[in-house]
Image: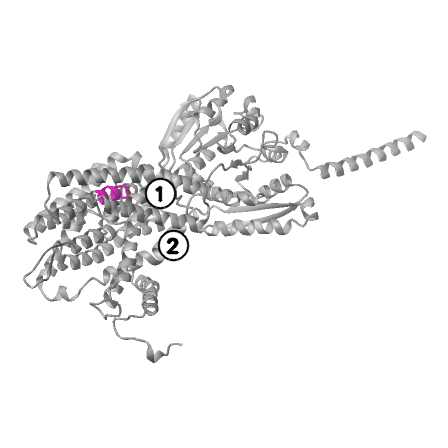
Amino acid sequence: MISLFLLDLSLPLKNPVIIFSVVLFIILFAPILFSRIKVPHIIGLIISGMIVGPYGFNLLSRDSSIVLFGTVGLLYIMFLAGLEIDLAEFRKNRNKIIVFGLTTFLLPLVTGTVASYYILGYGFLSSLLLASMFSTHTLVSYPIASKYGVTRNRAINMTVGGTMITDILALLILAGVAGMSKGDVSPAFWFQLGFSFIVFVAVVLFLFPIICRWFFKRFDDSISQYIFVLAMVFLASFLAEIAGVEAIIGAFFSGLVLNRFVPHSSPLMNRIDFVGNALFIPFFLISVGMLVDISVLVNGWGALKVAGVILVIALASKYLAAWITQKAFRFSADEGLMIFGLSSSHAAATLAIILVGYNIIVGETALGQPIRLLDEDVLNGTIVLILVSCAVSSFVVERASEKLAILQEEQTTEDSDAVSTEKILVSLSYPDMIADLVDFGIMLKAKYSSIPLYGLHIVTDEDQKHDSASHGKKILNKAVDHASSSENVLIPLTRYDTNISNGIIYSIKEQDITDVVIGLHLKTDHKTFLGPKVENIVKRIFETIYIYKPGQPFNTLTRIVVAVPPAGSNEPGFLHWLGKVITLAKVNSMPIHFYASAQTIKITKSIIERKVSTVEVKFNVFNEWDDFLIFSRELKIDDLFIIVSARKNSVSYLSQLEKLPAYLSNYFHEQSLILIYPKQLESGINMSDIEQADSALIGTLSDKLGALSKAANYIRMKLGEK
């Protein structure tokens, strides 16, 4: 045991255990303390780094370990920026987003370059690089808008889309300036940079998806998947450096590629967010704070002058860009304020650009001191910009979110009442399908939704004889654990009944379930494709039923193909299942291809156009359900095939639907399938249900009727004797 007196407690600390402990306590307590004074946690971590760093109390030195974790945190931030971008929203409103992105990029770039060159006296390359920092923005205040539930507002979607444009353009300028500052720039340099960048983009955008799809299809271990994601991020970062651009560009592009492979409501996304926000990103912010020398700001007017110019140009140019966008697209004043609030905060990309410029040595002084492309005045001025801009952004977004939330509440339609009454039940029977079915149920309710999710396991009389109740308990425990890994709550239900179908039916009615998920095992054939249990449920339950057969992991699918009967839009549950399909496409960044009648396509188009959710949609007229097998040629193995079926005697029922089990089991055996039975309006007594009743109940009724018949005969005989 090492004695306390033998420990080296001299400053800066050198014991790795103590160093890591200090950093962890900073990560823990800094956000808690600064949140009490309404200061964003990002500012709190940077200030903490300033306090414990070499220019503060000198508790920690910015050694190789701090630099290593800080670099990982920087790449992690850029990776998350690409991972969280809504690609479908960008495609739909790409023209408006491009206009806003270019406006909020060019205005700060031009004004910043002029101000840096003429007011601050920097060279052209330094001025251009400094101005590109003004052009970027980080969505630091996005969680505030999320807290108020207004993230679907068009102004927020536009700002998020503009983030991608500003970051890419600024990082390309960074690559060019960094290359020009390191040597003689010639046409060959630009050709080599352009060619290598094109090759890099081609490898990441076309080769990486193939590798990712192959891996996720074959490995479902959560730890392996997370390590694979990190490996792809750093591989892309390394390839970017080989191509002659900065590693942060590679991290950003890897996020774009992995965007569709990591559903936002999945356990994998939860792990990515958790590790990044708990360790890597705070390490980066602390390491940035350790770079700041506060004494520079008070030792002369140079640093104060730089900080003042940076603040005025950065905030004023972003406000002007937001105002122009608001007027051009006729947004409300609150939406314009939201655009300014979200786009005014500077953090991740800003620090990345400044740190790269700070580390570029362009020469030496007579005393041997390095001459940097961007000096310490710019670095410290940038830290001031981060502190002030994040504070301004948080207050502006808070104010705009409050007003937009009130407006949104006033415009709430009856649909919100319908959503609040939804309940999703997942029937769990097969242990090897638990993860697939629970994930599917979670995707139906979308992220942050308060819709309850139930997991049901039925224990029959036969199961009790074989002591299968404990097996069912293990299934439910596994389902609860899997749901909690993505921060979702699954309510376990165990029911004892004479048979499985009755147990599911009565549980649905008792819990007022609106959506039922039933798993279809991959080994089913045309004889057991649905089976009497599922058919019984379909006949006796009028809520929306999803029969799901997972052919491969959901995040490896590339497209949703939906086949709708000719009169499918006339069903009472049409709007409900359509909304769920759109949610699936939105969560997984997949396009939808509808095959339906012209009338159904017309109605579907009008509904989707009114929805806030943005998905890529294509329509194909399809009426000949006798030629259903044409889908075997249209579908690819990575497609999700959704067939909207119908119950007998419903308005969209077709006799051809009776052949679906044979078709699907014989010609679509390896395809990922979802068979949807839309909600029906329950009216009267369906006599066919009696045929599907519990055999034990029928036997009991038969015995009672037999006894009554005997009693009637006995009375008739006695009356006859009289």
Residue at image mark 1: 258
* Residue drawn 34% across the image and 55% down it: 277
Residue 533 seen: yes
Secondary structure at badge 1 equals helix
Q: Is residue 642 left or right of residue 192?
A: right
Q: Earlier in the sequence, mark 2 or mark 1?
A: 1
Residue at image mark 2: 274
Q: Quadrant of residue 36?
A: bottom left
Q: Assign the C terminus to one quadrant of the image.
A: top right
Q: Which residues are magenta?
A: 159-168
Q: Assign the N terminus to one quadrant of the image.
A: bottom left
In the image shown, does 562 or 207 lie closer to the viewer?
Answer: 207
Residue placed furthest toward the right: 721
Q: Amino acid at mark 2?
A: Phe
Badge 1 density bin: few <14, some 14–19, many ≥20, Cα 10 Å: many
Residue placed furthest toward the bottom: 5
Q: Position of residue 58 (x, y in %)?
A: 23, 70
Q: Is residue 347 left or right of residue 427?
A: left
Q: Is residue 373 above or below residue 92?
A: below
- Residue 143's tag is none
Q: Is residue 443 above or below residue 352?
A: above
In the image shown, does 187 or 286 lie closer to the viewer?
Answer: 187
